[in-house]
Amino acid sequence: MSDEEDMVVTPWEVRGKVDYNKLIRQFGTQPLTDELMKRLQKHVGELHPQLRRKLFFSHRDLDVILDLYEKGTRFVLYTGRGPSGPVHIGHLVPWIFTKYLQDKFKTRLYFQMTDDEKFVVEQNLKLDETAKLAYDNSLDLIALGFKPENTYIIFDVKDISLLYDIALEVAKRVTYSTAKAVFGFQDHTNIGWIFWPAIQAVPCFIHTKLTGEIVPSLIPAAIDQDPYWRIARDIAPKLGYYKPAQIHCRFVPGLGRGGKMSASEPETCIFTTDTPEMIKKKVWNAFTGGKPTVKEQKELGGNPNICTIYQYFLYLFEENDEELVRLSRECKSGDIVCGDCKAVLTERITKFILEHQKRREKARDIVGEYSISRN
Amino acid sequence: MSDEEDMVVTPWEVRGKVDYNKLIRQFGTQPLTDELMKRLQKHVGELHPQLRRKLFFSHRDLDVILDLYEKGTRFVLYTGRGPSGPVHIGHLVPWIFTKYLQDKFKTRLYFQMTDDEKFVVEQNLKLDETAKLAYDNSLDLIALGFKPENTYIIFDVKDISLLYDIALEVAKRVTYSTAKAVFGFQDHTNIGWIFWPAIQAVPCFIHTKLTGEIVPSLIPAAIDQDPYWRIARDIAPKLGYYKPAQIHCRFVPGLGRGGKMSASEPETCIFTTDTPEMIKKKVWNAFTGGKPTVKEQKELGGNPNICTIYQYFLYLFEENDEELVRLSRECKSGDIVCGDCKAVLTERITKFILEHQKRREKARDIVGEYSISRN
């Protein structure tokens, strides 16, 4: 079986070598073209590294969002997190991008903490555990510098009274047959999980309930979450809303060979609560594109394309494009070896995480200010 | 096809001639035996006419409820209403019985107004309409004399924040396959309807959340609602609760030939908002067991067993058993004719409804005192 045949991408599983062009065809989304990037650039000034490097690579209706924006209709941002464990760097990458969009477009963000979903989907998680994780995860979001003035965190269970009426409107219009086709539900799927796509659709539309304004929402998220919005997009016009637009990113790789960074393989993840020792150990054990010995590396050069260390520079830890090109060139030529890169990355991740941890602790005092149910 | 083969009884449909003994076998419930009636009588003093006349005829675990009660464990009552239209006398009959149980056992009642259910099930009802109906219907409940001290009305949509966590606990433990088998869900059923049995189970268990007490609930309801509690009964032990017990009543007949009183045939229903003229017209057009002419009736006598007027005396408008027997006897002998009974019933219903309407108007001022979300 080839790597490509082995590719499985659903909201609950990403497996095999991911072919992003194939995902665009398979999910029926649009590529983020240079032309669209130029339109974006007109509004944001400088393109974010995640755009320049095509880490965000696909979209639905981003052009429509810009059409409306250019005619004076604003949009809101919506993204979220399934709190099944601690937050790692892979989660932060699209959140950092979301904050960039929020800052540039001065718009409101609705962030959904899906403690209800994780409870019904994960056999072994209890409701108080997913609620606790939702709280902990929200500290990581706040630590990134989102401001309470335009950031509204939805804790599904706590805030259900705001969500339920819209969820019912959605649910009434989604048959079991449609939900089954989109999510692969089976006879043994529980009825909480089957209902849940209706809850996930709510933040696309909740801005209108809160403010009376009818504006579209733009969802930055990894492409595996796309199926949820297909249902929300089908329903939106029936309820008098705009279809939610999306901008899709790649999966942040873990530090092991292949696959996205996943909390189920903790040794390949940098969690936001890791100590400097843990970070150092994980980075030094990472899978790289280097040769077995320093001697061979210096003679033959390494392969940054398969190197997880290089991916980390690419995604988050080297914002300067010229520096990134230099790293790639010097790796290929054998001028630098894996130890060099690991030392630099360890230092940068450690600095980033230690500062994040300080802001994360301070977030405990202000988390209430971000609640969608605040007064 | 015989009448019996034609019998369809589900939570959404009652059709054909109902064979109550067959329903006991079909639903796997227990008959309300004379022995159990005697045990009840020990606690309540006088048996309610609806018990004496076997209008309540079946149960699940009523014996267990009495076992526990006799050892000092109280129980709570739970019943409800799907607010798809105005309340008619058929709805009041089990509520009146519920109040009798509440008064005799001095226990708390949880009453669920399922505006969410009616919204997802009824294609043409909007959410603000079912919410309005839930409010209107609650006035009828309060008009029956329930006291706020021990009556807690749950308006599902408004009160969802109290219900959702328990609903998730239930939903996680109910597969689609089980829900399909119990309720006959199909591929075109919407996902709101599929989830809803989890919401309906919540009031069985909510007393524990509110008070910390673990007590069983007893549900007085028409037997067509039985399937809901089968799921709640399966789940209860897994969540550390008692299985909800039930006491089942017959369907109150409409004023037409056959079938239960149903708002979908308004000319055969006495609504609580009907005027004296409407009541008179409906009663005088009712299907009776009388003969085509007064002459024939006087010679041959009538048949009270098929007479809807007689059923109304039986269910609600003649509490004196001897009077009821007299009516039956004099009908059969031709000593009274349909006009006699219709005149008496019109007078009694009119008096009842006019008084109900006065109390119903007063209920508007105090409905908030009954809300489960009151402080």
Image (cartoon, coloured by chain):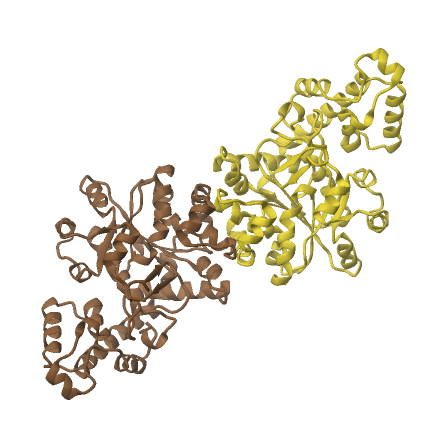
Chain colours: A brown, B yellow
- Residue B222 can be seen in this image: no
Q: Position of residue A77 (x, y in %)?
A: 29, 51
Q: Position of residue B93 (x, y in %)?
A: 72, 36
Q: Camera-side residue: B15 or A342?
A: B15
* Position of A297 relative to A143 (above/below): below
Give left or right: position of A362 versus B327.
left
Count of numbered circles in the view = 0
Q: Camera-side residue: B106 or B48?
A: B48
- Given the current orientation, which residue lies at the most extreme front position? A1
Position of the N terminus of chain B by quadrant: top right
* Position of A342 relative to A207 (above/below): below
Q: State which quadrant residue A355 falls in.
A: bottom left
Q: State which quadrant residue B274 falls in.
A: top right
Residue ID at (67%, 41%): B224
Q: State which quadrant residue B133 falls in.
A: top right
Residue ID at (88%, 15%): B298
Give left or right: position of A63 versus B371.
left
Q: Position of residue A136 (x, y in %)?
A: 39, 66
Q: Camera-side residue: B22 or B352?
A: B22
